[in-house]
Image (cartoon, rainbow, N blue to C red):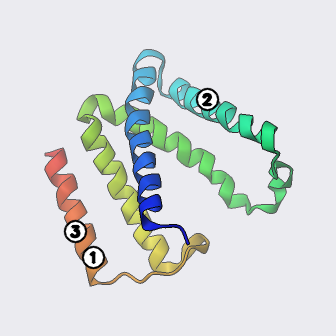
Amino acid sequence: MESILFMLAIGLASGIAIGLQGPMASIITQRLGALESVFIVHFGGAIIALIPILIYGSKLGQWRSVPWYTFGTGLFGVMVIASISYMIPRLGVATATTIVIAGQLLAGVVLDHYGLLGVTTKSLDAARVVGLAIVTVGVWLTVR
């Protein structure tokens, strides 16, 4: 199993990437528009992902083996970029990011509790409820 420090480093790197992506996408949105921003972000990501696929190979040809509903991830990506790009100039980076993270935690708790989408079941206990309450207070303090 991976070390907890390695997992923390991956999570922090991802959080930093989200923290930087939002303001950059917001700049594109302000100058070109929301759909253009979403397109540029996803096109750039596709090009970056294509490089190791071309070098190392891929299972992309087996795309029909994944459940149909997983293709909704593209829609979710559009929603994330568009909403962050919209919120940042109006609320600021920290507030927009806090709201997004709160939404991620809410979705995560529901998915964990019911074991949806193949995740390991982790019941909603008192400690998790307290954690969510703290995050909710943090969102409120950040937004106000």
The answer to whether residue 128 is above or below residue 95 is below
The answer to which of marks 2 and 1 sits earlier in the sequence is 2
Label 2's element? Answer: helix
Give the tally of numbered discs.
3
The amino acid type found where label 1 is placed reads Val
**In the picture provided, is 123 more to the left or to the right than 89?**
right
Q: Position of residue 28 (x, y in %)?
A: 46, 21
At x 26%, y 83%, the residue is 126
Q: Quadrant of residue 50?
A: top right
The amino acid type found where label 3 is placed reads Ala
The amino acid type found where label 2 is placed reads Gly
Label 1's element? Answer: helix
Q: Quadrant of residue 117?
A: bottom right
Please give the residue where the numbered disc 3 appears in the rendered image.
Answer: 133
Quarter the N terminus occupies: bottom right
Q: Which mark is residue 129?
A: 1
The answer to whether residue 27 is above or below residue 12 is above
Could you tell me if the residues under marks 3 and 1 are in contact, i.e. CB atoms within 8 Å?
yes
Please give the residue where the numbered disc 2 appears in the rendered image.
Answer: 44
Residue in the foreground of this view, choosing between 64 and 11: 11
Quarter the C terminus occupies: top left
Q: Position of residue 105 (x, y in %)?
A: 37, 62
Q: Which mark is residue 97?
A: none
Discs 2/1, front = 2
- For disc 1, the neighbor class at 10 Å (few under 14, some 14 to 19, many from 20) is few
- For disc 3, the neighbor class at 10 Å (few under 14, some 14 to 19, many from 20) is few
**In the picture provided, is 140 more to the left or to the right than 87?**
left
- For disc 2, the neighbor class at 10 Å (few under 14, some 14 to 19, many from 20) is few
At x 81%, y 53%, the residue is 63
